[in-house]
Image: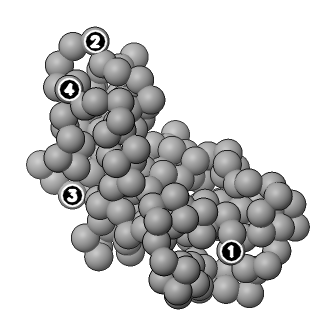
Amino acid sequence: MKLIVREEKANTGNIMVNGYNLMKIRSKAIPMLRRTMGIVFQDFRLIPTMNVFDNVAFAMHVTGAPTRKIRKDVSAVLSMVGLGNKARSMPNQLSGGEQQRVGLARALVNKPDLIIADEPTGNVDPTLSYEIVSKLTEINKQGTTVLMVTHDHNLVRDFQHRVIILENGQIVADNAAGGEGI
């Protein structure tokens, strides 16, 4: 994951993400690369001094989006993840599942080409895990690539998407040929 978002640089090989060659990308272009993706973190990474609306809007502010567009898009994405009524709530007033949905909304608000979800269900109950993966599946069906890392074998089995299993940095299984879970 750190290679894909260019937090770390690979020693050898090639990594192409959204048209960027990560082995040759200049440091000043890394923020532009990251704007092509939305990232959902396991630990939510919400700004505790900002309400839900502002946490999501922050992702648009950094891109220079106009205020009117921010208001419209943030409201729409909060409704999409079922948090339209929590826009003025502070992160510490939310359940873990609600915080994770704020993180998902923040990842979605700029309509990225790629969503990277790093253990998005790691800190939530099984019911919410299924809701989150269902939402990511919906997003994928609308044309956004979703890369999700999980250790939850039940989710992998139940949702049956392409699954790549890594052990010690090596691919040990890839069901690319079929649509069934491993």
Residue under pointer 4? 24
Locate the C terminus and report the quarter of the image it occupies.
top left
> For the residue marked with disc 1, what is the amino acid?
Phe
Residue under pointer 1? 53
> For the residue marked with disc 3, what is the amino acid?
Gly
> For the residue marked with disc 2, what is the amino acid?
Asn
- Which of the marked residues, 1 or 3, is nearer the chain's N terminus? 1
- Which of the marked residues, 4 or 1, is nearer the chain's N terminus? 4
Disc number lying in front (3 or 2) = 2
Q: CA distance from mark 1 to mark 2?
A: 40 Å
- CB of mark 3 within 8 Å of CB of mark 4? no
Q: CA distance from mark 3 to mark 4?
A: 34 Å
Residue at (34%, 48%) from the top-left corner?
32
Residue occupying the far top of the picture: 11
Name the element at disc 1: helix
Residue under pointer 3? 179
Disc number lying in front (4 or 2) = 4
Residue under pointer 2? 11
User: Is residue 153 at least partly visible in the picture?
Assistant: no
